[in-house]
Image (cartoon, grey):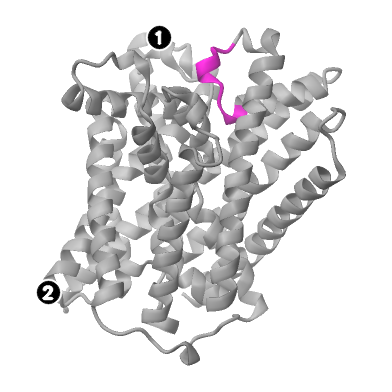
Amino acid sequence: MNQDEVPRSLNDSQNSLITHNVTCVNESTRTNQNKNQGTSNTETLMHIIKANIGTGVLAMPLAFKNGGLALSSISLWIMGLICIHCMHILLNCYKYVSANLKEATDIIPDKNIGYDDVVELIFKEKFSTNPKISKYSRFITSLFLVIGQLGFCCVYLVFVPTNLKQVIDYYYPSNELTLEILMCIILFPLILFCLIKDLKILAPFSTLANLLMISSILVILYNLFFDGSLKPISQLDLVAPYYDWPIYFSSAIYAFEGISLVLPVYHEMRYKQDFSTWNGVLNTAMIFVAIMYFSVGFFGYMKYGTDSAASITLNLPTSSVLFQIVKILFAIAIFISYNLQFYVAADIIWAQMSDLNRSASKAYNLIQNVFRSSLVILTFLLAIKVPRIDLFISLVGSIASSTLALIIPPVLDLMIFWKSSNKTLLRFLKNLCVIIFGTYIFISGTWVSLTDIVDYLKNR
């Protein structure tokens, strides 16, 4: 990416990565097809599934432990439906902006309208007498997007060495490699990897990471269903203590992390009319994702019970060569995925640094490389200070995921339809309930997560 290609929004970065990823697939499997036609329904389905399958699904057994088997089994499906509904709200808000705010969208190509653009344009219309409000709304949305993306990076930085250490400790039990030392070892190659700014180079890495994750998850599911017995329900909590619920809800909402990708995949879709119908691509993909979450969470908790770890990979017996391979493959996949999450956050921040973007071309790359390296080091410092996967997952879920997935979409829906003929009491109450639920996760989850982090630092 050169000096003239600084993205305006989150959507630009993700949209470009999707485009390059799909182009690689098209060139190898459908060489006679026009690459400008967009992604097929199947390709779009896979993009949504891959966007939602990551470290979150691996943390579901621990989430079920914090919620209880019965409470989690019921509430996970309710949360899934709410998250899917909020994705549809965001898409409807985009369609409203695209159809009714043509003057505002003239400055933004329709295909590049992202989450933060939708928020800014709607606030700009509703608060036309005070343009600062729309700027603030965009800044706040972008801030939570960056917090979410960098939060995922922190989780990844802890996840990789934690899984590798299990394998190393098995073969070299007397080694002196601590988790912090392993994090330092992977820092330098991670910085070099994050200096790659060419999306054409990153797209094959994304494909490789997806293949490694899918194959590893299949092995994990085999372990849950066919390798060993499950614990009797009498030994498990059906409903966990209420003070653990905020961690459960925060971890669960962290798993449903794909709302920021809804508009990019929609823009790239060839048959857009098939995206948001009741049996369309979005619903189908998210139902599959919810089934995956439920399966790993429910059966993972029934298998490991109170011993459920922050990642189910940590529960896999290290004595098995197959499970050693799974830990290593997942560590490699997450290492690769770091730059894919980092890329979006770095570009959002870099786009705001207008003075640096106007620097002389000779210094431009150097300044940008220093900036990206510093940002990687920042996530490293946060991760090494609190090297706990579960603490980061609950904190990121409570702060960023709850805001983006549950709070902002219904707020936008209320703003758009408050004075329209589509306004109903049921719609108002529905949006209000979702906002209250998201606010509960934000406040209680953030408080409990920060309290747990402080306690961890005190007792470390």
Q: Position of residue 146 (x, y in %)?
A: 53, 39
Instruction: Examine the image and state in which quarter residue 373 appears.
Output: top left
Q: Position of residue 204 (x, y in %)?
A: 22, 33
Ranked by sequence position, the earlier of labels 2 and 1 is 2
Residue 171 has which mark? Answer: 2
| Residue 115 colored in magenta in the image | yes
Q: Which residue is mark 1?
A: 360
Nearer to me, 71 or 399: 71
Identity, as a three-letter code, of the amino acid under mark 2: Tyr
Q: Is residue 284 left or right of residue 329?
A: right
Label 2 – label 1 distance at C-alpha: 52 Å
Q: Position of residue 200 (x, y in %)?
A: 26, 24
Residue furthest front in the image? 279
Q: Residue at x 31, y 24 (%)?
A: 20
User: Would you say residue 384 is visible in this rendering?
Assistant: no
Q: Is residue 96 left or right of residue 79?
A: right
Q: Where are the magenta residues, as a range?
A: 108-116
Q: Position of residue 182 (x, y in %)?
A: 26, 60
Residue furthest bottom in the image? 234
Q: Residue at x 54, y 41 (%)?
A: 259
| Residue 122 colored in magenta in the image | no
